[in-house]
Image: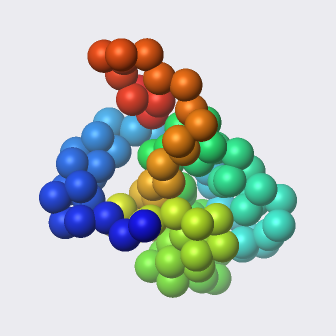
Amino acid sequence: MTLTSKERAELRGEAHHLSPLVHIGHQGLTDTLLQTLDDTLRTHELVKVALAKTTDAKPGDAAHEMAEKVGADVVQVIGRTCTLYRENPDLKRKQGALPPWR
């Protein structure tokens, strides 16, 4: 699923207030990190990821690689922080409830 520019803009606005939930250290994109990201996306859908200054990967490249490996969409990349989104249709939602990332 690819996001439309309107959906991406709405998610960027939602992500503005979020803190990074996943941090990439000097070891880069390990299997453990990808599993953590997958779990976080499953429960939150919209996730900010912070790259440490010691990480060799370029933020844009890392964002697209992570998105590809966990089946998510890149919402935005700003500096060393990227935001990923993956809808979880199995997540139980109540009528009128806030989205899972709030």
* Colour mode of the rendering: rainbow
Q: Is residue 100 above or below residue 78?
A: above
Locate residue 89, reporting x and y percent: 53, 42
**Which corner quadrant of the image does residue 102 belong to?**
top left
**Which corner quadrant of the image does residue 30 belong to?**
bottom right
Kindly tell me whether residue 21 is visible in this rendering.
no
Is 24 displayed left or right of 89 in the figure? right
Residue beneath the point at 83% across and 67% down: 31
The one of 65 and 88 positioned closer to us in this rendering: 88
**Which corner quadrant of the image does residue 75 belong to?**
bottom left
Q: Is residue 63 above or below residue 42?
A: below
Give the total of numbered labels.
0
Locate residue 97, reporting x and y percent: 36, 17
Residue beneath the point at 74% across and 50% down: 36
Kindly tell me whether residue 1 is visible in this rendering.
yes
Residue beneath the point at 32% across and 36% down: 17
The one of 91 and 76 positioned closer to us in this rendering: 91
Q: Look at the image and tell me in which quarter the N terminus lies.
A: bottom left
Locate residue 78, reporting x and y percent: 34, 65
The one of 93 and 66 positioned closer to us in this rendering: 93
Q: Residue furthest right?
A: 32
Residue beneath the point at 29% across and 49% down: 11
